[in-house]
Image (tube, rainbow, N blue to C red):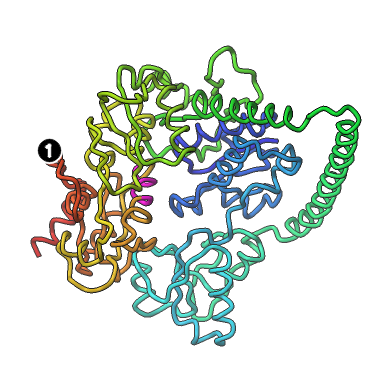
Amino acid sequence: MKITSTLLTETERSNLVKILAKILPCATYSSDLTSDVTILVANPSRSSDWLQSRKFQYVVQYRPEVSIVKYEGILTCYEGWLRGEEDDSTKGDGILDSLTSVDVFEGLKVSISRLNESLDSESVDKLKELVEKHGGQVSESLSSDSDVLVSTIPEGRRYTKAKEWEIPIVSPDWCFDSVDRGSALGFKYYTLVKKYGKGRKSDSCDWDKLKAWREKDEEDRNIRRAKLEAALEGKRTGKRKSENEKKKKGEDYEERDLKVAKIDVKDRIWNSIMREASIGKVREGDGEDDGWETEQKVGLGEAETGSNEFKLLDRGMISSQNQEHPKRESDPLLFSGLKFSLYGFKEEEERILRVVLKEYGGIVAAGGEVDYVIISSEKNEDPNLGGRVITEFGIERCIYYHGRKALEDEKWSRPIFLRSDVEVSDFREALGLEKVDKKIQVAITGFKGIDLSEIERILRKKLVKGFEFCEMFNRECEMLIVGEDGGDSSVRKVRMGRKWGVRMVGWGEVVRGLPNRRAERGSGVRSEVHGEIRREAAKEVAN
């Protein structure tokens, strides 16, 4: 089995290689889309850029035998493997059926315009239903972050704006044909060039090849299903024999087996997560791996030579490892000399945290003076245990960035304490927003990696009483939180936000402005609206 990926960051690709070595040790990772590749891994949750990937477009058009799966699905599979949730359906070829495929319109923001002028209401409703059923969001309005505009009339305000913002404009049959293919077809084959125009379906995909492959794939699936059922039946038969033997011998095999299972799962989790799979950044950058050059392989089945490093033969990865981050494995000295106490965690969370801290040289003290009190980010009360108070996010960031600097990070590592009776009005008053009885609709831009992960978790969970997180930035949003990693998309959102009167702030400003936050503020966290994005946001004040 050979696997490749498209438009993953260097970090994600490094993680993928190491995880695949665990769950698919006989597989091979290739940077190139070669003729024997059977799996293409993409991460649609990060952005829709994967649609423009040459690998993705080629697979959709000519390679129906290649499964396009989610990077997050690989992580889910790995988590199950760590918990010991393996069975015959998640081993060897059976894993193909357990991986999560990228849906046809996965995460796409599909705007529609003037469809009722050429389609009956039933067809329009069916189009909307298909898009939403297959992972997309349908909107009858157009914004700068829309991914595609579906229309039948090449005129009008939305059409003009889509052209201005360089948003693809396609005919409705793009939606229906994409569902038939099982993946989003190339926009260029369905570009709307005339009134009521149709796309070039015959050019968008090798339909004959797709049909032949589907027939063969169905046969293969039936064979795998039959093998799995036979294996399960064999296990049931073996279990019955085992139970009969236990009765005859009078021994408590069940208790012994349970102990063995527990030891195995525990060792597997900690040996894998803490020593090899606490994978940090390989290097900064967008990490596009869409190369079509001479194949650079990474052998996943090679034995580890007394260390925790894999033989990564990708030249870019080797270069970045040797020069920028010479030590990628767990750093046993990261928290050396630091004493921690834990507060507010569930039993399993605390157990994991203890193991992590020990793995990186930290000490979890039972009492006495400590350097840091780690409090669950879900808690709202100050434990008053002495020591500097941080959340698990601080530890997470230290491991991610391979340094202690994150422990002092006011924006990300400090706890947010909210009153139990805090209301929407408190958030609005604290942040200087209009006093109305509804949650603050907030969108984000310019965040990636661990920042993106943590800010979404905080907004969706910790601050859910005051904020409603919006996946799509539109004129209904009252606030846009701008990070430092924004590109052209962030600049466009800031421009649109200024036009719509949306308040734009950095994450530090939000944290400082929250109601009833702890008195310890740190020293002047500055706005995260940077560079061109900051200049654009500044115009809001000037105007």
Q: Which quadrant holds the C terminus?
A: bottom left
Number of disc labels: 1
**What amino acid type is highlighted by mark number 1?**
Ser
Q: For the residue labelled by badge 1, is the local secondary structure a helix, a strand or a loop?
A: loop
Q: Mark 1 points at which residue?
A: 523
299 and 377: which is toward the camera? 377
Residue extent of the magenta highlight: 451-457
Magenta segment, prevailing SS (helix, strand or loop): helix
- Residue at 42%, 76% in the rendered image: 140
- Residue at 27%, 25% in the rendered image: 370
Residue lying furthest left: 542
Q: In this view, does 233 lie above or below 398?
A: below
Q: Categorize mark 1 by other alpha carbons within 10 Å: few (<14), some (14-19), many (20+).
A: few
Whether residue 297 is visible here, answered yes or no, is no
Q: Where is residue 296 in the image (x, y as percent from the top left)?
A: 57, 28
Q: Which quadrant holds the N terminus?
A: top right
| 109 lies left or right of 105 | left
Q: Is residue 540 above or below residue 128?
A: above
245 and 458: which is toward the camera? 245
124 and 304: which is toward the camera? 304
Q: Position of residue 89 (x, y in %)?
A: 74, 44
Quadrant of res 541:
bottom left
Residue lying furthest top: 306
Q: Where is residue 411 in the image (x, y as percent from the top left)?
A: 24, 43
| 292 lies left or right of 90 | left
Quadrant of res 134:
bottom right
Q: Where is residue 226 in the image (x, y as percent from the top left)?
A: 86, 48
Does the magenta-highlighted stretch encompass residue 21?
no
- Residue at 52%, 25% in the rendered image: 276
Q: In this view, does 527 lie above or below 303?
A: below
Residue lying furthest front: 250
Whether residue 134 is visible here, answered yes or no, is yes
